[in-house]
Image (spheres, rainbow, N blue to C red):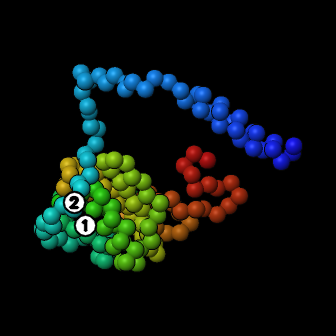
Amino acid sequence: MLRALPALAASLAAAVLLSGCSGSSAPAAVDTAAPIVSLAPTPSPTPCPPVAGKPYQWPAGVPKDLPKPPGSTYVSATTSIDKVTIVRLSSTTSLQQSVLFVLKEVSKAGFTLGRGDAEPAEADAPFGRGDIRGIYKMLSRDTCSTDWLVATAKVTFGNTSPVLPTASRGPSSSPLPFG
């Protein structure tokens, strides 16, 4: 009797689940009047064709060996009073190709990637090496066009970076901005 109890319980559970699944076999009505809206560019099914960008040098404040996005063209650069250098670029790559480039090439150049974030039309990837902290921010303009912000700063340990916070030491200090 005790051996039959698990089999009986399984049979009862299956019967209950199956009875909740009964319903009409007629297909649901589809509203053909409602427009289909796409909120983000659709990733390219094939890689974008390689297109050379205009050659440029990183401005002061950006490590010279930081990988440059493929097919990128320099747009502008600014350095804030906090000594954060922000470089604007545009590239002829898809957002997916751009993210894959960062994942492969930044580590090869000796930088450590932090935990990034990606959404359908944008992505970011923080990085660091020694006293340099930075972030690549990528925004898809269309299937084969991405805008980039590359921000870097030199930090001294014990202080926080305007780009990436560094953990402070102490009983009440927190690397989080709210506490």
Residue toward you, 7 or 43: 7
Q: Amino acid at mark 1?
A: Pro
Residue toward you, 127 or 34: 34
* Viewer can see residue 4: yes
Report the side of 141 relative to 62 (left or right): left
User: Image quadrant for the N terminus?
Assistant: top right
Residue that carries the numbered disc 2 in the rendered image: 46
Q: Amino acid at mark 2?
A: Thr
Which residue appears at 27% of the width and 62% of the height?
97
Residue toward you, 28 or 76: 28
Residue 165 vs 60, above or below: the answer is above
Q: Secondary structure at mark 2?
A: loop
**In x, y percent, where is residue 101?**
31, 67
**In x, y percent, where is residue 13?**
69, 36
Report the side of 50 relative to 24 (left or right): left
Q: Distance from label 1 to label 2 (Cα)? A: 18 Å
Which residue appears at 83% of the width and 48% of the height?
3
Report the side of 142 relative to 135 (left or right): left
**Quadrant of the rendered structure where residue 152 is?**
bottom left
The tally of labels here is 2
* Viewer can see residue 84: no
Which residue appears at 25% of the width and 24% of the height?
32
Residue toward you, 85 or 45: 45
Name the mark on residue 69.
1
